[in-house]
């Protein structure tokens, strides 16, 4: 049994704690910590987690805990990674590692020095549809990749208070799409060019962010891609991908709660996409944890490593620069 300490009992911490406790064979949750102790207590009581703390250092000090799942707010990730590595714990860390490349590098260095496993929470790679599209690309079924298209629209914008500390849309939301672009193409992004605006909520603009964007990507293998983002799609969570190449095209459509169709005098009616990430990506949250546990147990390299965590942050920074300076930006300009 791999004994986990879960750090952070908010939206995603609850999901990971529940999956580790009930749906990931070979794992158990030995402790949970949140600065908001009540949040941790509520989850601990529901999942029968034996130890509950306000201070995550108590998890790190427990020699019977093998691994941590870092699910606290983004600004805490990098230093908790360093401390967890120094305490000899294997680490699953939610995305992004940080918004500061120097802090990310220090965290990755600490992990390397300690020789512990690190996996970053880019869960969409484990979505069965997207994984199948990737499989078709790696089997050569799409041929040479020419075009990649990702549509990624949230059902509703986050509160402006969240926007202010999120690092902006590119580092908070599009970061998943940057990871998908690398994953699906099997290539690295070399340049980005962004057109963006505030079309959903003026409050987001006043907070210095955008809510709508088209990002053009140029890849090292010559392919070209686009990501389109909106913070508000009135019909739900719109998550589609398409790869197109010399041998064909592979695409994944939205997941819906059912696939019934009803037809009447008004038209053809079908279900809207699943509402948001908790519904749409539940399977992937379980699969990513199973993969992490397997990597620790079999002493293999976790499928989403430290550099996979760092590179999308660099792409996000390049995207922000491109938007602000209204020009194509090469990733080599960022570092
Ligand atoms: N992979 C995904 O799809 C996905 C989805 C949602 C969130 N996330 C990431 O997960 C992280 C948390 O997001 P969330 O939506 O769950 O936020 P949240 O605000 O719901 O939860 C964060 C929790 O961390 C706690 N916390 C803050 N500082 C702490 C500390 N020092 N020690 C212990 N607990 C601490 C807070 O009290 C809060 O309960 C963010 O980095 C976010 O980017 C990833």
Image (tube, rainbow, N blue to C red):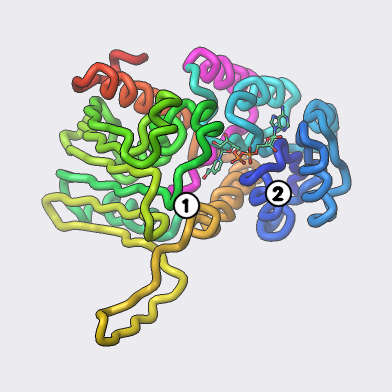
Task: Indicate left or right for 212 with 243 as reference.
Answer: right
The local crowd at label 1, few if under 14, some if 14 to 19, many if 20 or more residues have their Cα within 10 Å, is: many
Disc 2 designates what residue?
A: 17
Of the two numbered discs 2 and 1 in the rendering, the one whose residue sits closer to the viewer:
2
Task: Indicate left or right for 208 with 65 as reference.
Answer: left
Q: Nearer the viewer, residue 63 or 211?
A: 211
**In the image, the residue with mark 1 has its CB under 8 Å from the nearest atom of ligand 1:** no
Read off the magenta span. 101-124
Task: Indicate left or right for 77 with 306 as reference.
Answer: right
Disc 1 designates what residue?
A: 126
Could you say where residue 329 lies in the image, as x and y percent from the top left? Answer: 24, 20
- Residue 210 in sight from this viewpoint: yes
Residue at position x 35%, y 47% in the image: 152
Ligand 1 quadrant assignment: top right
Q: CA distance from mark 2 to mark 1?
A: 18 Å
In magenta stretch: residue 109: yes
- Residue 180 in sight from this viewpoint: no
């Amino acid at each position: 049994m791999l004994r986990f300490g879960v750090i952070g009992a908010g939206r995603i911490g609850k999901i990971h704690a529940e999956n580790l406790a009930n749906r990931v064979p070979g794992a158990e949750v030995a402790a949970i910590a949140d600065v908001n102790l009540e949040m941790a207590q509520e989850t601990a009581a529901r999942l029968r987690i034996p130890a509950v703390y306000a201070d995550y250092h108590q998890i790190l000090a427990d020699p019977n805990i093998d691994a941590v799942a870092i699910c606290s707010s983004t600004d805490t990730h990098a230093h908790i990674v360093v401390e967890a590595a120094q305490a000899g714990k294997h680490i699953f860390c939610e995305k992004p590692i940080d918004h500061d490349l120097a802090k990310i590098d220090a965290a990755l260095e600490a992990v390397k020095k300690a020789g512990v496993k690190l996996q970053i929470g880019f869960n969409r790679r484990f979505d069965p549809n997207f994984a199948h599209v990737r499989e078709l690309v790696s089997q050569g079924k799409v041929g040479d990749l020419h075009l990649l298209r990702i549509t990624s629209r949230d059902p509703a914008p986050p509160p402006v208070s969240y926007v202010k500390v999120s690092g902006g849309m590119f580092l908070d939301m599009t970061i998943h799409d940057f990871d998908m672009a690398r994953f699906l193409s099997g290539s690295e992004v070399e340049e980005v060019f962004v057109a963006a605006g505030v079309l959903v909520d003026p409050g987001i603009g006043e907070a210095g962010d955008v809510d709508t964007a088209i990002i053009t990507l140029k890849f090292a293998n010559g392919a070209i891609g686009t990501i389109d983002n909106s913070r508000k799609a009135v019909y739900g969570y719109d998550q589609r991908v398409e790869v197109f190449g010399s041998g064909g095209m592979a695409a994944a459509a939205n997941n819906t709660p059912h696939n019934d169709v009803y037809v009447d005098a008004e038209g053809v009616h079908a279900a809207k996409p699943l509402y948001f990430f908790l519904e749409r990506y539940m399977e992937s949250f379980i699969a990513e944890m199973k993969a992490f546990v397997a990597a620790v147990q079999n002493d293999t390299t976790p499928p989403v490593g430290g550099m996979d965590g760092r590179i999308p942050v660099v792409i996000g920074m390049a995207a922000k620069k491109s938007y602000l300076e209204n020009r194509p930006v090469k990733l080599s300009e960022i570092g």
